[in-house]
Image: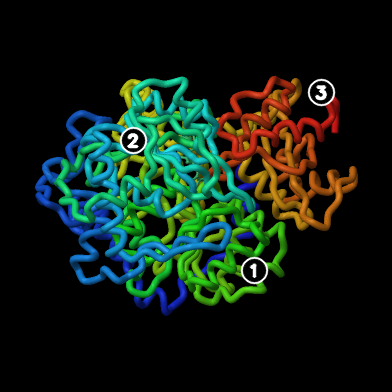
Amino acid sequence: MSNESLANLLKEERRFAPPAELAAAANVTAAAYAQASEDRLGFWAEQARRLTWAVEPTETLDWSNPPFAKWFADGKLNVAYNCVDRHVEAGNGDRVAIHFEGEPGDGRSITYAQLKDEVSQAANALLELGVRKGDRVAVYLPMIAEAVVAILACARIGATHSVVFGGFSADAVASRIQDAQAKLVITADGGYRRGKPSALKPAIDEALTKVDGVEHVLVVRRTGQEVSWTEGRDVWWHELTARQSTEHTPEAHDAEHPLFILYTSGTTGKPKGILHTSGGYLTQASYTHHAVFDLKPESDVYWCTADIGWVTGHSYIVYGPLSNGATQVIYEGTPDTPHQGRFWEIVQKYGVTILYTAPTAIRTFMKWGDDIPAKFDLSSLRVLGSVGEPINPEAWIWYRDHIGAGKAPIVDTWWQTETGAMMISPLPGVTETKPGSAQRALPGIAATVVDDEAREVPNGSGGYLVLTEPWPSMLRTIWGDDQRYIDTYWSRFEGRYFAGDGAKKDEDGDIWLLGRVDDVMLVSGHNISTTEVESALVGHPSVAESAVVGATDATTGQAIVAFVILRGTATDSPELVEELRAHVGRTLGPIAKPKQIKVVGELPKTRSGKIMRRLLRDIAEGREIGDTTTLADSTVMNLIQAQLPPAGSES
Ligand code: ATP
Ligand code: MG
């Protein structure tokens, strides 16, 4: 990206010091950075002591066969015991672990003592079905408490779980079941979405006509809708678990025992089955949840709005919060059912103090209007988190002002399925935050930005984000494909993990994420990041959301094509489009002016809320549209195409 646009971005920069009260009582202070940089492995060894080990590890990192890491390899622990039993043993059995809020307004609150019983019963149920340590279990559930119970039951007996988004098609589920060779599938009749029951079991029934090896399907009854039943294979969850003992003795598993496989979102291409193991993963999930959210388990009510089917749900609904003994909210449904204030109603109802959500949700709330959150009491909120995409400064400020009462610190957390836990983020009691920047590697994490030749770029320049040292929750491999693991992450820059994201360092050395390197545009010899142009567009009062792609262009190499969704009050007109182009020119410089701006009603997104730019690039270049199987709503591409003039004609 050009230096003039960087200068422009920095000019607008505002900074926010941590609230004094929070800083004074923060879980983690600035000393953690110094401690970790003096002795990184010692730092992680200390964090591992947050956990309860059956056998304490004496080794921290074994990096003798890079890029295959072993962390805490001679230690043994039970992950589920760490997330449940030990809190009961510590006298906190009556603390609520999960406030489950169903979309129809039903719900239940589950204490740690109850969770221990339910997880034990589920573990015994899995054993009765013949599932053993090392087997794989596919989980295809809505956002209900049973999803957490099922995951922990697997962890408890040492079965490796592979959670698949409840929104994925039968084919997508089938390929994931096949790849992991799952023996059991845990699903539900359905879940509630957008005010009505949405069936899940039919997708499993169809998927299982395509793959072999699944012995049983364990079915949670959620909606009561009719399901077809295969005798001998299908088993009701409530019937099987109810007759199990609430006693189950957790076995200690090796720190490197496979905990789960999770497929990446598929934003850039064929999803990869990322393998995570136990001790290192839990150490970093637990530490980051404690540090980045400043979680006080006795008083906080935490809510992460992610789906359990993506990594944020794994690390920051299941393993991070529960290992820390947190009280959290789990919500089944969509943010606009039955009304657009549903999230804020939930915050008010449970007194949520820490909220973790995605930029796409924040931009949607902005589009719906400031008056909606204003109707609710959000004064309990003290820390706000963001994950999934770069958050544009406009949305960041809105989040702080309208949700955080103009004072809650925002932690913009950069990480990936592959990293397992947060890597780059402010610390709420330490960092002077800057809207739009994830800022700095967490204590114990080593990240930097390099150029094509793997040279670290100076402050004020951009390049590729790399991680320069192994970290406890790193992926161990791509399931069944060590070579792809090496090629994808460790081959671009010798000895360094290549994240696939572009980034820049500002004059203070703080890191700004610029989106995927595959998305960076080359216009007349200048590298321009999609994130910056999108951010400039959303900075205009008429624009709610935007997605920008580079389309092959005879004169400029690539031309910038922008897709925008307008805010409620704005209407599409040639004048507005011209104004938006001029606005980007003023903000980032004339080189970044989009050649075309297309006003659309929706953007193609994954279920985790990420924009699939490659599909928009297909449209912009007049190609047939690529793989849409991981789209949240597969009809969106048809809608967009129908709204646009045929490819090749100028806007
Ligand atoms: P695939 O790898 O299959 O294309 P994906 O990368 O979307 O899928 P995830 O692991 O869910 O799958 O997403 C990680 C990516 O999300 C990061 O590499 C980055 O591009 C983006 N991301 C996550 N958090 C942030 C953040 N705070 N700021 C900027 N980008 C972020
Ligand atoms: Mg990725």
- At label 3, the amino acid type is Gly
Kindly report which numbered mark, 1 or 2, lies closer to the viewer in this rendering: 2
Image quadrant holding the C terminus, namely: top right
Q: Name the residue carrying label 2.
A: 137
Disc 2 crowd, CA 10 A, few/some/many (<14, 14-19, 20+): many
Foreground: 634 or 205?
205
Q: Residue at position x 34%, y 51% from top?
A: 149
Labelled pair 2, 3 in contact (Cβ < 8 Å) = no
Tell whether label 3 touches label 1 (CB within 8 Å): no
Q: How far separated are the C-alphas under marks 1 and 3?
A: 42 Å
Q: Secondary structure at mark 2?
A: strand
Q: Which residue is mark 3?
A: 648
Left or right, 564 with respect to 223, comes to: right
Q: Which residue is mark 1?
A: 373
Q: Between marks 1 and 2, how big is the CA–CA gap?
A: 40 Å
Mark 1 or 3, nearer chain start: 1
Circle 1 or circle 3, nearest the eye? 1
Distance in Å between CA atoms under marks 2 and 3: 48 Å
User: Exactly how many numbered labels are in the figure?
Assistant: 3
- Quick check: 528 above or below 649? below
Q: In the image, what residue type sits under mark 1?
A: Pro
Q: Secondary structure at mark 3?
A: loop
Query: In percent of the image, x 17 and y 37: which residue is there?
Result: 62
Coordinates of residue 48 in the picture (x, y in percent): 20, 54
Q: Label 2 sits on what residue type?
A: Val
Q: Nearer the viewer, mark 2 or mark 3?
A: 2
| Residue 168 image position (x, y, % from top left) | 53, 35
Q: Against 27, is 621 above or below?
A: above
The one of 214 and 501 positioned closer to us in this rendering: 214
In the rendered structure, which disc, 1 or 2, sits on the residue that comes first in sequence? Answer: 2
